[in-house]
């Protein structure tokens, strides 16, 4: 489908108009995560351009946009997964609970404990279901050995998986179905008692029913967790997210309440994307 | 059938037949060796063979208990030295070895892998036998360990590289420090592959003769002391096989059969370890 140049800038990947957007502070909700003019480079290639946004607590924030536009890069910046990427560098700041995650002396291990992550493809450890969930609490000594089974059960219940696996705790996590594996990965993240849950297209490898279960789960989980969800699926963002950010070639083009963004987008590129004119 | 389809069909049949023949040839070698050993050696294997030390030349009877135990000690000690170093090096190469040091280590391992075993024996002689002023089982073990290390390093590296990157990320995202991720998640996942690599490596060096010739030297008496010269099955075969007595030849065949059985059982164990199980990366 051809796109009129005048309406949407350059969907072919050229730099669009890049005026920094103001920080959107949703009313009434304290910020869990703040990105302040955060830019990121893979070697010479700039992947993110001055991302400014405030991610509110106890809400689901969806990041949408075409592939390769920086959604995942941004997500992985938040728990500093780029630390091991050769040639990676950044400027600007990301603040979790008003403390910079890049501050010297930040304990990356503790940071990652506080920020759970669920990946695109389910990646359970080739270990029993129980051990998969117990990995985090054991590592971080979050509870005594006696309390561990309770904690594992709670995490599995929170991930809406307990009923299906309570008789299979000794079976390898890799023997579950794809949707179950992804919920196991969510349980594994929850067992660490994170404050923030990062989800990188958690449903892209799942069928519609498994997707629906996870979406219902997310809506329940937001009572207690702050969730950032990268998704390619705009319907999914519209269904579950309270706030949505639109990434386009490394810029956060628009960020705001989901309803607002989908019904009255302020930027013409956002409109073009959500109405399916490109992407 | 069109002529083209017919031609394809014929070529397919021909190639299949060729592969079957070549495969049979490869298996035939093993069958012939085992058959020959069983025919010539099995009759000499009795209880005394396993429990008695050699008797003086000319007498009949006696066994190779000293050599069987010796092989066990020398190879076991070699594994004790070689496995930690080899597996550790392999883990380093796979997890951290992308830089210059990794390149150098990998290159050295490859060169060492191709080094003739007798050269390794000379090295062990120079660095262990000469300073100690005596041949010893320890020197033999060092020589075998040096042979084992590059093999283990490269197989471990390959096994660890098979572990999906997503597992590493999962562990890191849970808050695992990198070294713990390497040990607890990556190495654990690759464990059955690593164990197989170790067993195959051990089986390989168990039959080595050349590096033991001027390190462990051989010993006609039973000994458990690793600072003394010690007999090994391969050395026993060499000495008995080249000796002038019929009795010795008989014992050489039997020793060869035992050595072969030993190596085979290690290989079978390796197979058993890698049989399909969760936790396997293959």
Image: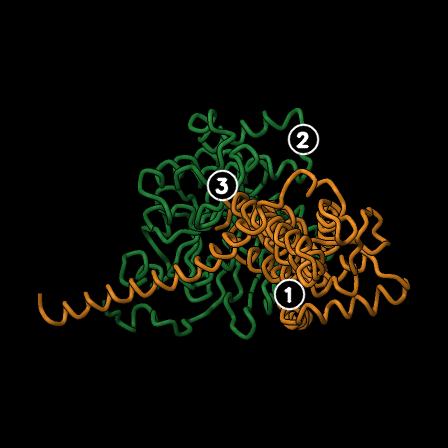
Chain colours: A green, B orange
Position in image of residue B110 (x %, y %): 62, 70
Q: Residue at x 72, y 64 (%)?
A: B211
Q: Residues within 10 Å of mark 2 (few under 14, many from 20)?
A: few
In front of the other: A191 or B265: B265
SS type, badge 2: loop
Name above or below for residue A106 compared with residue A277: above
Name above or below for residue B152 compared with residue A241: below
Q: Is residue B39 left or right of residue B28?
A: right
Position in image of residue B11 (x %, y %): 23, 69
Q: Chain of mark 3?
A: B
The residue at which mark 2 appears reads as: A143
Q: Is residue B172 visible?
A: no
Q: Is residue A10 left or right of residue A78?
A: left
Q: Is residue B32 left or right of residue A191?
A: left
**What separation in Å lies between label 3 and label 1 (alpha carbons)?**
29 Å
Q: To which quarter of the image does residue B273 belong?
A: top right
Q: Chain of mark 2?
A: A
In front of the other: A230 or B175: B175
In front of the other: A97 or A163: A163
Which mark, residue A265? Answer: none
Q: Chain of mark 1?
A: B
SS type, badge 3: loop
Furthest residue toward front: B58
The residue at which mark 1 appears reads as: B97
Quadrant where the image shows the C terminus of chain A: bottom left
**What separation in Å lies between label 3 and label 2 (alpha carbons)?**
31 Å
Q: Is residue B94 visible?
A: yes
SS type, badge 1: loop
- Front position among marks 1 and 2: 1
Position in image of residue B47 (x %, y %): 67, 38
């Amino acid at each position: 489908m051809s796109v009129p140049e005048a309406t949407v800038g350059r969907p072919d990947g050229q730099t669009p108009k890049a005026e920094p957007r103001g920080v959107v502070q949703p009313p009434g909700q304290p910020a869990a995560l703040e990105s302040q003019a955060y830019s990121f480079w893979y070697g010479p290639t700039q992947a993110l351009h001055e991302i400014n946004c405030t991610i509110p607590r106890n809400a689901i924030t969806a990041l949408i946009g075409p592939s390769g536009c920086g959604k995942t890069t941004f997500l992985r910046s938040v728990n500093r997964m780029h630390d091991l990427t050769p040639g990676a560098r950044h400027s600007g700041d990301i603040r979790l609970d008003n403390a910079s995650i890049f501050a010297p002396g930040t304990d990356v291990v503790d940071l990652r404990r506080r920020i759970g992550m669920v990946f695109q493809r389910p990646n359970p450890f080739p270990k029993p279901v129980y051990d998969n969930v117990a990995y985090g609490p054991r590592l971080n000594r979050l509870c005594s050995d006696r309390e561990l089974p309770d904690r594992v059960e709670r995490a599995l219940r929170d991930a809406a998986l307990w009923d299906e696996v309570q008789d299979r705790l000794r079976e390898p996590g890799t023997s579950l179905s794809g949707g179950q594996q992804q919920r196991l990965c969510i349980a594994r993240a929850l067992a660490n008692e994170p404050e923030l849950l990062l989800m990188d297209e958690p449903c892209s490898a799942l069928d519609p029913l498994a997707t629906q279960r996870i979406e219902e789960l997310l809506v329940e989980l937001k009572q207690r967790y702050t969730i950032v969800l990268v998704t390619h699926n705009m319907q999914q963002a519209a269904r579950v997210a309270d706030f949505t950010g639109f990434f386009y070639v490394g810029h956060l083009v628009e960020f705001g309440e989901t309803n607002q963004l989908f019904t009255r987008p302020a930027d013409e590129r956002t409109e073009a994307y959500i109405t399916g004119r490109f992407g | 059938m069109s002529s083209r389809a017919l031609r394809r069909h014929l070529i397919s049949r021909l190639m299949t037949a060729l592969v079957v023949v070549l495969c049979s040839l490869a298996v035939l070698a093993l069958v012939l060796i085992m058959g020959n050993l069983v025919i010539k050696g099995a009759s000499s294997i009795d209880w005394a063979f396993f429990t008695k030390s050699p008797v003086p030349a000319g007498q009949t009877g006696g066994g190779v208990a000293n050599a069987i135990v010796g092989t066990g000690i020398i190879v076991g000690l070699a594994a004790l030295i070689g496995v930690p170093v080899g597996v550790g090096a392999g883990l380093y190469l796979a997890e951290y070895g992308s830089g210059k040091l990794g390149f150098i280590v990998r290159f050295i391992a490859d060169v060492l892998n191709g080094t003739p075993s007798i050269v390794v024996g000379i090295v062990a002689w120079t660095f262990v036998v000469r300073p100690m002023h005596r041949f010893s089982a320890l020197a033999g073990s060092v020589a075998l360990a040096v042979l084992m290390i590059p093999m283990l390093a490269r197989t471990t590296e390959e096994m660890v590289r098979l572990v999906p990157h997503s597992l590493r990320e999962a562990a890191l995202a849970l808050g695992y420090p990198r070294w713990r991720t390497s040990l607890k998640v990556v190495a654990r996942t690759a464990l059955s592959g690593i164990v197989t690599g170790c067993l195959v490596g051990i089986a390989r060096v168990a039959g080595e003769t050349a590096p033991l010739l001027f390190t462990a030297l051989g010993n006609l008496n039973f000994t458990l002391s690793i600072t003394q010269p010690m007999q090994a099955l391969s050395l026993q075969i060499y000495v008995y096989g080249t000796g002038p007595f019929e009795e010795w030849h008989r014992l050489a065949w039997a020793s060869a059969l035992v050595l072969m059985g030993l190596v085979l059982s290690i290989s079978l164990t390796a197979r058993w370890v890698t049989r399909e199980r969760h936790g396997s990366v293959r």
